[in-house]
Image (spheres, helix red, strand yellow):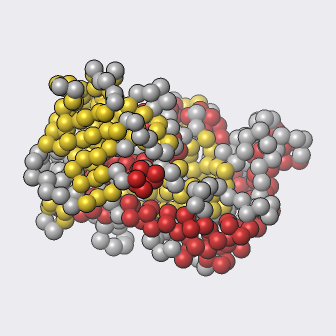
């Protein structure tokens, strides 16, 4: 496959594939720094924390009396790790759990324990509620993305919750919040109007949901004018566009009637070969590696298809496509509760994460927010914990390496991606993006999908003098290499630099690897 930038693709910051032979191991990569695309919004690196398994209890919250080092009950080690990757926002309390969550159960000195019927049928003490989540967000330095209960809740309940969080005048709910220890209003940067309303959020039809969308969108508001809230409507969970049509038609027809929203969600997990997810997270072979990556690359046509419908109603791209659930959904770790969705995280997941981030970046004009599922101990997690122990996953390291791309401006690249084949699966051999950060420094991210062969890149940068190129690369001894509590550094980034000869950069990357380098003048 050859990726080149056409006039249309440049406007959309998208690389378009055409067929080409790629027998040569060397890849010629050309950056056109005179042309730029959209800003890669930092919110595409968002996180997701649901009341699911040990994602919250044990992963974030250990309680104020825990021997595990904490600040007001919140794990210090997890906070420090998340601060390092500059998490832009965290979506909470779900997920499916959001549509069974009643916020009053989790505020004040007396909490109401409930059965988590969405995940595992276990008791949720509600010790971690609104004030604790906001404290967590403040400690991490991230923005709050609150998912409203549309499925089993009411408009009044949601409106009261927003008033409790954001009222800056002495209402009864503002006074209640103050009595609970926080007189100043919280900042709710993002508000989701439901979650998967076509399934666990209420089994609604498009017409039923758009009716709820109008009611919740009209009556549930932010009371703090100094810190506005973006509203996100529920979008599709498949490539079917019927739901998208209904939501975008509602936006176009009703916008301005004291009603608006700024984003529409899209949920897409990498689940290979049918439901329930059964692909093992460890102990897999090269064919399983290729199969999973072939599935994750379907994110590209999925985004294109949904974007085409959104463009019909919103050619100015005022409404963002928010991929607020994505990632690998694999078989649960043996010996764990099936309903806790705990899985290991391998070098394959690192490659998978980089490919998805690159796709989001190529569609940065429309995809302006994304939230990987999930942050701690659940699905494709950044962090795994077990009591006092914590380990960073390969996916975490990819997010750390990509920090320079947050709010950077997309730079078009062209290259012959070649092909990598395993069995009946043929994939592009390599994938790459580039961007210029706010300080003017250009960054290149390179993913080698080939499980067997290294790839040498020869990089030409038109109009840019480069004296040095250095960064980090993430590779592993095996495709299924993981980090464990006993061996936490099996998959960790290593320093890498490029040779510069004749005005070109030369960089060789390992098989199944992710590399990010910055160009110095």
357 and 344: which one is in front?
A: 357
> Can I make out residue 65 in this image?
no
* Residue under the image location 56 percent in, 46 percent down: 90
* Image quadrant assignment for residue 462: top left
> Can I make out residue 169 in this image?
yes
395 and 449: which one is in front?
A: 449
Q: Quadrant of the N terminus?
A: bottom left
* Residue under the image location 79 percent in, 43 percent down: 224
318 is higher (above) or lower (below) than 240? above
420 and 21: which one is in front?
A: 21
Using residue 152 as the reference point, say whether residue 307 is left or right of it. left
* Image quadrant assignment for residue 29: top left
435 is higher (above) or lower (below) than 499? below
Q: Position of residue 146 (x, y in %)?
A: 64, 52
294 and 482: which one is in front?
A: 294
* Residue under the image location 41 percent in, 50 percent down: 10
Q: Position of residue 164 (x, y in %)?
A: 79, 48
Using residue 468 as the reference point, say whether residue 371 is left or right of it. right
Q: Position of residue 11 (x, y in %)?
A: 46, 51
Using residue 297 as the reference point, say whether residue 499 is left or right of it. left
């Amino acid at each position: 496959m050859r990726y080149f930038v056409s006039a249309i693709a440049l406007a959309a910051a998208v690389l378009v594939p055409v067929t080409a032979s790629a027998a040569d191991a060397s890849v010629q990569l050309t950056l056109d720094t005179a042309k730029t695309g959209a800003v890669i919004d930092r919110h595409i690196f968002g996180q997701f924390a649901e009341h699911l398994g040990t994602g919250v209890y044990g992963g974030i919250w250990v309680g104020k009396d825990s021997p595990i080092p904490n600040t007001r009950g919140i794990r210090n080690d997890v906070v420090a790790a998340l601060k390092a990757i500059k998490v832009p926002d965290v979506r909470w309390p779900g997920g499916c759990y959001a549509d069974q969550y009643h916020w009053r159960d989790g505020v004040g000195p007396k909490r109401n324990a409930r059965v988590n019927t969405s995940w595992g049928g276990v008791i949720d003490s509600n010790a971690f509620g609104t004030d604790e989540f906001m404290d967590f967000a403040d400690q991490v330095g991230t923005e709050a993305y609150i998912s409203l209960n549309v499925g089993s809740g009411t408009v009044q309940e949601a409106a009261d919750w927003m008033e409790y969080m954001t009222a800056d005048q002495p209402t009864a709910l503002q006074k209640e919040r103050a009595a609970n220890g926080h007189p100043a209003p919280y900042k709710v940067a993002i508000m989701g109007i439901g979650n998967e309303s076509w399934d666990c959020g209420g089994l609604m039809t498009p017409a039923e949901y758009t009716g709820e969308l109008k009611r919740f969108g009209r009556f549930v508001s932010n009371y703090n004018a100094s810190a506005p809230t973006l509203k996100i409507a529920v979008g599709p969970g498949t490539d079917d566009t019927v739901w998208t049509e209904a939501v975008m038609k509602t936006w176009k027809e009703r916008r301005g009637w004291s009603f608006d929203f700024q984003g529409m969600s899209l949920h897409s997990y990498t689940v290979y070969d049918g439901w329930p997810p059964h692909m093992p997270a460890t102990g897999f072979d090269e064919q399983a590696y290729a199969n999973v990556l072939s599935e994750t690359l379907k994110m590209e046509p999925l985004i294109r298809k949904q974007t085409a419908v959104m463009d019909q109603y919103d050619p100015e791209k005022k409404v963002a496509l928010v991929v607020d659930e994505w990632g690998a959904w694999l078989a649960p770790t043996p010996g764990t509760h099936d309903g806790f969705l705990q899985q290991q995280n391998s070098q394959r997941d690192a490659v998978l994460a980089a490919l998805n981030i690159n796709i989001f970046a190529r569609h940065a004009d429309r995809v302006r927010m994304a939230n990987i599922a999930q942050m701690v101990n659940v699905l494709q997690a950044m962090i795994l914990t077990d009591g006092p122990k914590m380990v960073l996953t390969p996916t975490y390291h990819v997010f750390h390496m990509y920090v320079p791309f947050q709010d950077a401006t997309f730079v078009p690249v062209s290259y012959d991606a070649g092909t990598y084949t395993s069995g009946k699966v043929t994939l592009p051999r390599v994938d790459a993006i580039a961007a210029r950060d706010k300080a003017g420094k250009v960054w290149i991210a390179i993913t080698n999908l080939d499980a067997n062969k290294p790839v040498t890149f020869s990089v030409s940068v038109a109009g840019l003098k480069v004296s040095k190129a250095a960064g980090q690369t993430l590779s592993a001894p095996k495709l299924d290499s993981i980090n464990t509590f006993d061996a936490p550094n099996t998959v960790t980034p290593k320093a890498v630099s490029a040779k510069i000869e004749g005005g070109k950069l030369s960089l060789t990357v390992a098989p199944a690897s992710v590399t990010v380098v910055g160009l110095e003048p």
